[in-house]
């Protein structure tokens, strides 16, 4: 228990609430009421006042029932039964949904039965349901990468227009707008989460005078500070080897070489996109017209080599570290100066008792690169605008989808979409991105810093965090996840080869060639022509 | 026949010993034939429907199960009608046989069929026949052969586990104080789930920075006690965890054997002037050979299935150093949805295990005979 943080946040919340009350006078009547609802909702239970409980989720769900009431009569779905398949990681996801939907069930008369899955079991269960035609769920919490498997096979129901209005679909950040969430021009997804890798770093490392002096003494012309490019990240990591900070061993960048069910590949991707994603090219992982893997190109090989070069400067057991380790057991526990991760680090760093770095963590978009590889010319380009940045919009976040099987029953169809729309509501989403939920910011309306401060967040902290998120989402050269069928199979195969490279069994280029060969085989097995078409569609080409 | 039925109910006994009338036999045969025909028809319809040859069919394969149950019932009733009392006796065996066919024989054969398919769950075309391509792919699969190589290490390590377990069993068999207490304590690791062990020990006790094992290692002079970063250290660490869980099993089997051994032989050896080691090596160990062979075979079978500790702690790394066949197949199935190929890997592994164990059993029975 850390009473200091709680009392500080309590004080900050009340002070900020007093401060922001003045700003509200500028809004018109209904907006004021809505903002009051949002402000009231965010005080349930209050940031820093302990983890929310089911009672809190139900209160929030009740408060946000307004949009549902506008479209659905009371008791309209009496007798309708729906089944919902989703996750239960870290006691979030479905556990929150149950609380949010309880008031919805009470109002509409529908009943929901639940299928809870651990994240590791999610993909196999989904693939099995699809392959054996045993889709036994009406509503599905799903990640965007699987849209190829589900929507591509016609298993999802198209979103009705009234749902688009209810959830204010235009409020989504740019990168979550179509083509994400759509297939062949039809919209299927209620977005409830945004995903990108941002750059998390320790502010105390980069403001430490001893390290600054050592950096200069080592002959470095540049100033000691937060790296902006991967070249600088490498230099800093090698420099920090053997150094100490506050009496502890200092470490720079943390790589995650151990396989993690396919998710580990994103972390190599985060290192590679600045090298591989050219502003003039939409593709960065495969060639658009042939699905020929680009992992053998100099950009990806350089990224793999970077990992190999950095590993000797990282903790001795880093080969056995998967992203869970680097994020939660290392970085949040005080080891290492830099780590890429999803927005969870920012959500947890201040709010969780397992974090010791809440006061010394900073956020930015992923580092860029002094040069970027041009796949068309086969040369490295130095951009006139400076270093090339290409934030890795990895995984694209969770969404709620309705399955096509509800189409046979008109009431069931409306009920399923109403439940999905309730969970994807604009106001409800603000609560989920502020409190532990498994979901991060995904709407432009989430970027109002005053609302976050009013809820109890420290202004500097949340400004830095939100800038790193929105700066990635809206970046013109962002690298967006390909949503082709079986994408995680590609990642999993790559992970296996990468461990061999990182363990020193062969060099980066040989390993990359092996990955490419395995990927080609996989593309043929899944069906090359269709994959090419779907890859183009996913890129919006 | 008359002798065996001792508790005879007069009329029942008379009925059973009468020859079953021909009409009843024919009725029985007809029943079985009808049920068989019906089941085959249902199966044929569903196969044709699933392959797209005909439009009519069932939504899923459950009717086949119902047809099988109906057929099994008809077979049982038919047996009684055709063969009378002998049929009644067969009824004691029939359910078990049919159950085994349904849940062991059929899945194995169906598995062999799947192993001949190219079936990636994400593939648009669905499963299609692949012939021997999966097998050819298997022979070129570096990961599979790497895992098999690791299994040799893990299997040989069983001998080390056996030695430790035998020592513990001898200890527990001796008249030491607190014997009952130690027996329970030594058994405790066996009661833990391997997944719990991988977290408790692999990820907590052996954690590089704060784990007690790492701290101890540092105190003993090992500066960077990374238990899973170097291939051989990682293999030994995984083996140590699996051994810790499994040694109690070997120990308890050997202890049972030791306790069943006649004491007179050992006393005779003592009288003859044999020291402790000689008694063990020339008397105890040879007498324990049948038990030892049994427990080693069982232990090797379990060892060849090692997966959970590897999956949880190292995911097969570093660089495949700790990968087992099962953990590799797990990845092929779970992360790559490559169902056909994964089944082929598993079937081939099954074949190899059967061959290996047959050879082992032959060799050990020959050796046991020689020694005893």
Image (spheres, rainbow, N blue to C red):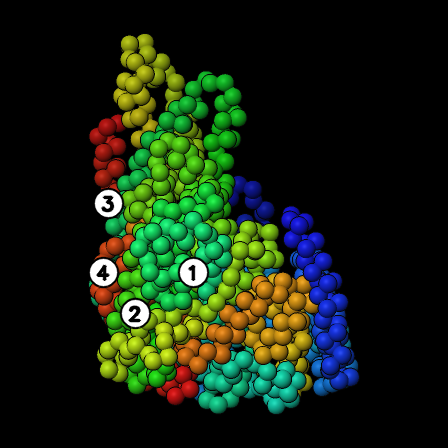
**Alpha carbon of mark 4 to alpha carbon of mark 1: how far?**
32 Å
- Disc 2 crowd rating (10 Å Cα; few below 14, some 14-19, many 20+) is many
Picture residue at 40% right of the left edge, 83% below the top: A539
Tag 2 secondary structure: helix
Instruction: Tell me which numbered mark, 2 or 4, is placed earlier along the sequence.
Output: 2
| Same chain letter for marks 4 and 1 | yes
Tag 3 secondary structure: helix
- Disc 1 crowd rating (10 Å Cα; few below 14, some 14-19, many 20+) is some
Chain letter of disc 3 in the image: B
Q: Position of residue A41 (x, y in %)?
A: 72, 70
**Alpha carbon of mark 2 to alpha carbon of mark 4: how far?**
13 Å
Q: Which residue is mark 2?
A: A300
| In the image: residue A294, left or right of residue B98 | left
Q: How many marks?
A: 4
Residue contact at pointers 2 and 4, CB within 8 angstroms: no
Instruction: Tell me which numbered mark, 1 or 2, is placed earlier along the sequence.
Output: 1
| Same chain letter for marks 3 and 2 | no
Q: In the rendered image, which quarter is residue A65 located in?
A: bottom right
Q: Which residue is mark 4?
A: A507
- Disc 4 crowd rating (10 Å Cα; few below 14, some 14-19, many 20+) is some
- Residue A388's place in the image compared with A255, above or below, is below
Q: Which residue is mark 1?
A: A225
**Alpha carbon of mark 1 to alpha carbon of mark 2: how far?**
26 Å
**Alpha carbon of mark 1 to alpha carbon of mark 3: how far?**
66 Å
Chain letter of disc 1 in the image: A
Q: Which residue is mark 3?
A: B359
Picture residue at 21% right of the left edge, 30% below the top: B370
**Alpha carbon of mark 3 to alpha carbon of mark 4: how far?**
41 Å
| Same chain letter for marks 2 and 4 | yes
- Residue A35's place in the image compared with B80, above or below, is below
Nearer the observer: mark 3 or 4; the answer is 4
- Residue B45 in view: no
């Amino acid at each position: 228990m850390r009473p200091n943080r709680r009392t500080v946040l309590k004080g900050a919340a009340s002070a900020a609430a007093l401060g922001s009350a003045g700003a509200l006078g500028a809004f018109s009547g209904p907006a004021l009421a809505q903002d009051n609802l949002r402000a009231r909702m965010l005080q349930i239970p209050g940031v820093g006042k302990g983890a929310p409980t089911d009672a809190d989720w139900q209160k929030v769900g009740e408060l946000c029932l307004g949009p549902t009431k506008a479209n659905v009569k009371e008791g309209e779905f009496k007798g309708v039964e729906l089944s919902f398949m989703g996750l239960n990681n870290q006691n979030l996801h479905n556990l929150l949904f149950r609380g949010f939907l309880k008031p919805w069930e009470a109002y509409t008369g529908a009943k929901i039965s639940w299928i809870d899955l651990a994240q590791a079991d999610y993909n196999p269960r989904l693939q099995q349901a699809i392959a054996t035609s045993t889709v036994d769920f009406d509503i599905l919490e799903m990640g965007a990468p699987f849209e190829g498997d589900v929507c591509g096979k016609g298993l999802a129901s198209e979103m009705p227009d009234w749902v688009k209005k209810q959830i204010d679909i235009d409020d989504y950040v740019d990168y979550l707008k179509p083509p994400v969430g759509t297939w062949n021009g039809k919209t299927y997804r209620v977005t409830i989460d945004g995903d990108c890798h941002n750059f998390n770093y320790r502010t105390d490392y980069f403001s430490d005078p001893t390290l600054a002096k050592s950096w200069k003494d080592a002959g470095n012309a540049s100033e000691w500070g937060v790296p902006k490019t991967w070249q600088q990240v490498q230099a800093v990591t090698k420099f920090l080897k053997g150094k100490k900070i506050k009496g502890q061993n200092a470490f720079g960048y943390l790589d995650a070489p151990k396989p993690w069910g396919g998710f580990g590949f994103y972390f190599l991707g985060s290192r590679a996109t600045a090298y591989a994603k050219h502003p003039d090219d939409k593709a960065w992982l495969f060639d658009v017209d042939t699905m020929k893997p680009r992992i053998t190109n100099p950009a990806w090989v350089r990224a793999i080599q970077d990992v190999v070069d950095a590993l000797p400067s990282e903790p001795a057991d880093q080969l056995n570290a998967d992203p869970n380790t680097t994020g939660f057991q290392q970085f949040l526990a005080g080891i290492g100066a830099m780590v890429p991760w999803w927005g969870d680090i920012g959500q947890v760093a201040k709010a969780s008792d397992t974090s010791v770095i809440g006061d010394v963590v900073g956020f930015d978009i992923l580092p860029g690169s002094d040069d970027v590889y041009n796949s068309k010319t086969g040369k490295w380009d130095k951009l006139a605008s400076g270093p090339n940045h290409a934030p890795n919009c990895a995984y694209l976040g969770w969404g709620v989808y309705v399955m096509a099987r509800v189409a046979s029953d008109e009431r069931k169809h409306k009920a399923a979409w109403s439940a999905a729309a309730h969970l994807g509501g604009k106001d409800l989403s603000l609560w989920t991105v502020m409190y532990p939920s498994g979901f991060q910011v995904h709407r432009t309306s989430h970027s109002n810093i005053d609302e976050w401060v009013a809820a109890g967040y420290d202004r500097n902290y949340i400004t830095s965090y939100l800038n790193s998120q929105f700066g990635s989402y809206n970046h013109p050269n962002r690298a967006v996840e390909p949503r082709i069928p079986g994408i995680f199979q590609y990642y999993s195969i790559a992970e296996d080869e990468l461990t061999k490279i990182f363990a020193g069994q062969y060099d980066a280029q040989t390993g990359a060639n092996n990955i490419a060969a395995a990927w080609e085989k996989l593309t043929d097995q899944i069906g090359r022509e269709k994959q090419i078409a779907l890859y183009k569609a996913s890129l919006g080409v | 026949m008359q002798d065996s039925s001792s508790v005879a109910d007069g009329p029942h006994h008379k009925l059973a010993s009468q020859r079953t009338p021909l009409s009843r036999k024919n009725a029985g045969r007809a029943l079985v034939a009808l049920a068989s025909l019906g089941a085959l028809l249902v199966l044929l319809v569903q196969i044709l429907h699933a392959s797209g040859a005909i439009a009519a069919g069932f939504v899923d394969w459950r009717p086949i199960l119902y047809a099988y149950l109906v057929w099994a019932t008809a077979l049982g009733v038919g047996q009684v009608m055709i063969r009378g009392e002998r049929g009644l006796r067969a009824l004691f065996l029939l359910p078990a046989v049919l159950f085994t066919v349904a849940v062991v024989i059929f899945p194995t054969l169906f598995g062999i069929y799947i192993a001949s398919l190219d079936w990636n769950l994400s593939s648009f075309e669905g499963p299609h026949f692949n012939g021997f391509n999966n097998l050819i792919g298997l022979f070129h699969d570096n990961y599979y052969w790497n895992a098999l190589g690791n299994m040799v290490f893990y299997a040989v390590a069983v001998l080390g586990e056996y030695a430790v377990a035998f020592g513990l069993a001898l200890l527990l068999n001796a008249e030491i104080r607190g014997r009952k207490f130690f027996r329970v304590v030594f058994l405790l690791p066996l009661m833990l789930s391997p997944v719990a062990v991988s977290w408790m020990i692999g990820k907590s006790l052996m954690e590089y920075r704060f784990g007690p094992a790492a701290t101890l290692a540092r105190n003993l002079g090992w500066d960077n006690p990374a238990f899973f970063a170097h291939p051989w250290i990682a293999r030994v660490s995984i083996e140590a965890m699996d051994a810790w869980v499994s040694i109690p099993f070997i120990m308890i089997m050997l202890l049972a054997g030791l306790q069943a051994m006649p004491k007179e032989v050992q006393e005779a050896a003592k009288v003859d002037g044999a020291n402790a080691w000689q008694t063990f090596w020339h008397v105890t160990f040879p007498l324990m050979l049948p038990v030892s062979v049994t427990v080693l075979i069982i232990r090797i079978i379990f060892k060849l299935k090692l997966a959970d500790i590897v999956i949880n702690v190292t995911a097969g790394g570093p660089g495949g150093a700790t990968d087992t066949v099962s953990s590799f197949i797990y990845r092929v199935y779970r992360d790559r949805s490559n169902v056909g190929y994964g089944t082929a890997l598993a079937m081939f592994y099954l074949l190899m295990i059967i061959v290996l164990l047959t050879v082992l059993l032959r060799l050990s029975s020959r050796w046991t005979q020689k020694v005893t």
